[in-house]
Amino acid sequence: MRTKKKLPLLENVTITAVAAEGKALARVDDKVVFVPFVVPGDVVDLQVKRKKNSYMEAVAVAVHEESPLRATPFCEHYGVCGGCKWQCLKHEEQLKAKQQQVVDNLVRIGKVELPEISPIMGSEKTRCYRNKLEFGFSDKRWLTEEEVSNDVKYEQMNAVGFHITGAFDKILDINKCWLMDDICNRIRNDIREYAFANGLVFYNLRNNTGLLRSMMIRNSNTGELMLLVQFRIENEDERKQAEGLMQHIADAFPEITSLLYVDNHKCNDTFGDQEIVVFKGEDHIYEEMEGLRFKVGPKSFYQTNTEQAYNLYKVARSFAGLTGNELVYDLYTGTGTIANFVARSARKVIGIEYVPEAIEDAKVNSRINGIENTLFYAGDMKDILNRDFIEEHGCPDVIITDPPRAGMHQDVIDTILFAAPKRIVYVSCNPATQARDLQLLDGEYKVAAVQPVDMFPHTQHVENVVLLERRNDTVLR
């Protein structure tokens, strides 16, 4: 029988830099060591958990010297929950790291000529900044190291909270999360107490059984509040249990203006293809921006940091350089937020989005705001945005694109090059794939401006807005 090799303990190691995925790094014997929950300048002992030829992964087991860059984490779940990994790093240092992340990606991956990159726009709110959170239910509660070391068999193994990275069927039971207004904590904790008191069965992901699956909370700057609960209802008794919970929520939290549920029997919690049942109130809430109202439904994409989204959209509109005469294509338009936001400054805006429900919301958003110069189309971007579409609707003067993390498909980039707009405004939540796409566009477009935006404090994530200008004003088709 093969004996598992014991991994080493590395003593008095100095953490030297911020790394990817919210980790930091050190160098030991010419090997890079990736470590979570530490900051540059910390001197620590590291227990290696994984060893490869060129790198190691480790965890800090003792701290000999704390870095001056270190901050005191404020969340009781820090270090166990997979989110907000940078609570231990001072906020100004987080911003520096995100700025450098953008620079590194554009230089190393994009390999394009760059102007001076603008300083990152920080989020005024660093806590309770999100307008949407999702929590899962599980009958397999994640046990902390302290609980495991107690060597006790716990009777209560139900949990409602966040999935543990690397343990897809385990949920960390959350008491207080700082990402959203405290109403989310009160609602989640109340539902848990009701479920315990009334014997509701929590979901088992491996077996696809159990009544309580997940919940989603959305709030808005209009004061409205949405809650959607996902069930897996097997019989009439469980239907009565589900409706009993929904009535309890309605009574306990009258401030909820949109109370919804889904009966989902699939093996995953995505509900884009599921029927939404309105238990009480409306099937949507509204966000407001510069006097515009935006309808947001349970299936809608809307930037999760409302206040910082406004700053992001102002940058995009500024980069677009609109005078009122331009035809604008808004790719990956979602609920048409950017399209409607810039419509008053353009001759016409055409938005394209994959999710049909989002496009219906985009049309509603135009209608309720009295905007008449927008058109919206639903479907896969690479299938809709083609040469025939360009020839039918006209060559855009400006393209605004805000793709998912994977970036743009090669076919979409080819069509953009064919359309040859004067300016492209590229909004990205992933500077690495943005940099790849910029390289593909570089033959025809130069990078004229770069503006990083911090949408998610205490995480490694950063948004980036790039203005591309066509190199040659003479375009032959």
Image: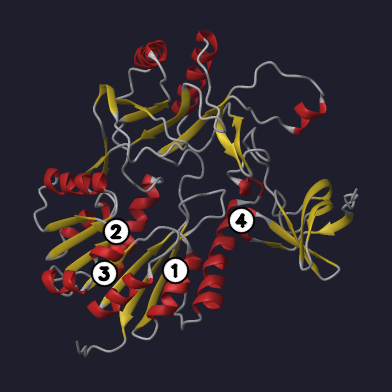
Say the numbered circle drawn on residue 407: none
Please report the residue visible at 59 percent of the width from the left and 56 percent of the height from the top.
94
Q: Which residue occupies the foreground of this view, 278 or 146?
A: 278
Q: Are marks 2 and 4 in contact (CB under 8 Å)?
A: no
Identify whether 471 is placed above or below 448: below
Looking at the image, what colour scheme do you see?
A: secondary structure
Q: Earlier in the sequence, mark 3 or mark 4?
A: 4
Q: Spatial distance from mark 3 to mark 4, Cα to Cα?
A: 31 Å
Check disc 4 and give the amino acid type.
Glu
Say the numbered circle drawn on residue 21: 4
Q: Earlier in the sequence, mark 2 or mark 1?
A: 2
Q: Which residue occupies the foreground of this view, 192 or 291?
A: 192
Work out whether residue 87 can be spotted: yes
Label 3 neighbour load within 10 Å: few <14, some 14-19, many 20+: many
Check disc 1 and give the amino acid type.
Gln
Please report the residue visible at 20 percent of the width from the left and 69 percent of the height from the top.
322
Q: Can you give x and y, in whole percent of width and height, for residue 65 in the image?
A: 83, 51
Can you identify the residue that label 1 sits on? 434
Q: Spatial distance from mark 4 to mark 1, Cα to Cα?
A: 17 Å
Can you identify the residue that label 2 sits on? 380
Please report the residue visible at 47 percent of the width from the left and 21 percent of the height from the top.
211
Label 4 neighbour load within 10 Å: few <14, some 14-19, many 20+: few
Q: Are marks 4 and 1 in contact (CB under 8 Å)?
A: no
Label 2 neighbour load within 10 Å: few <14, some 14-19, many 20+: few
Secondary structure state at the residue bearing disc 2: loop
Q: Can you give x and y, in whole percent of width and height, for residue 46 in the image?
A: 83, 52
Identify whether 108 is placed above or below 152: below
